[in-house]
Image (tube, rainbow, N blue to C red):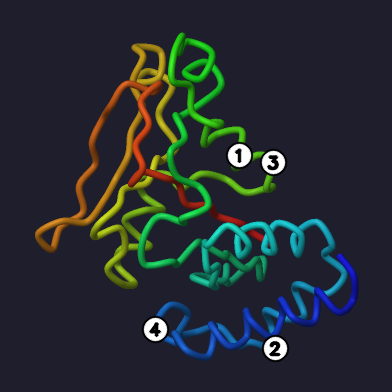
Amino acid sequence: MKAKEVDALLLKLKARFEQHPRRHQSVAWADVQARLEGQAVALSSLQAMEGSGGEPDVIAQDAQSGRITFCDCAAESPAGRRSLCYDREALDSRKENKPAGNAVEAAAAMGVALLTEADYRELQALGDFDTKTSSWIATPAEVRALGGALFCDRRYGRVFVYHNGAQSYYAARGWRGLLRI
């Protein structure tokens, strides 16, 4: 990324950080900025999260290591990451009407991780997300081995975890990423 792009990204991240203090009550922006300095790969990942509609924001800082956790905090599953099946195996198994890609490889290409169920529940403790959409989450190997994959959403004031065939895809289902720096 060019210096001008980095500056613009940092300004956007700082503005979001200041707009949503509840998400990171014990974290100072100066610590976040210091952690991001010289982290070209992490900045590229954050830019990709931002560019696909994720609205990344800080949600935690590890007290011992100082690591900062960014998560997609868009109200709904990021618009630029929807209509994807779960992983490569699922994509390859589709004979017709293949989606443009899959969530697992898209996350890896961005340099981020899919949220686990625990991560998703922690995010939902910070606000109401996915009230009209849903998001694929990292699926345990034993579920995936049976052909399934997990996704989550918030309905009726509760967080739900569901299953679907990993090859399925929907216009309202995307995925959220997590980045630890």
Q: CA distance from mark 4 to mark 3?
A: 30 Å
Disc marking residue 106: 1
Secondary structure beneath label 4 = helix
What residue does disc 3 label? 109
Q: Which of pointers 4 and 3 lies earlier in the amino acid sequence?
A: 4
Q: Residue at x 36, y 14 (%)?
A: 147
Give yes or no for contact between labels 3 and 1 (Cβ–Cβ under 8 Å): yes
Q: Does residue 104 appear to the left or right of 30 in the view shown? A: left
Give the Cα separation between the discs numbered 3 and 1.
5 Å
Mark 1 belongs to which amino acid?
Ala
Front disc: 1 or 4: 1
Q: CA distance from mark 1 to mark 4?
A: 29 Å
Which residue is outermost to the front?
Answer: 97
| Residues packed near mark 4 inside 10 Å, few (<14), some (14 to 19) or many (20 plus) | few
Asked whether the beta carbons under mark 3 and mark 2 sit within 8 Å of each other, the answer is no
Secondary structure at badge 1 equals helix
Count neighbours of disc 3 (C-alpha within 10 A) and say few if under 14, some if 14 to 19, many if 20 or more: few
As drawn, the label of residue 30 is: 2
- Residue 9: x %, y % from top left: 71, 76
Which is more foreground, mark 3 or mark 2?
Answer: 3
User: Amino acid type of disc 3?
Assistant: Ala
- Eye-nearest disc, 4 or 3: 3
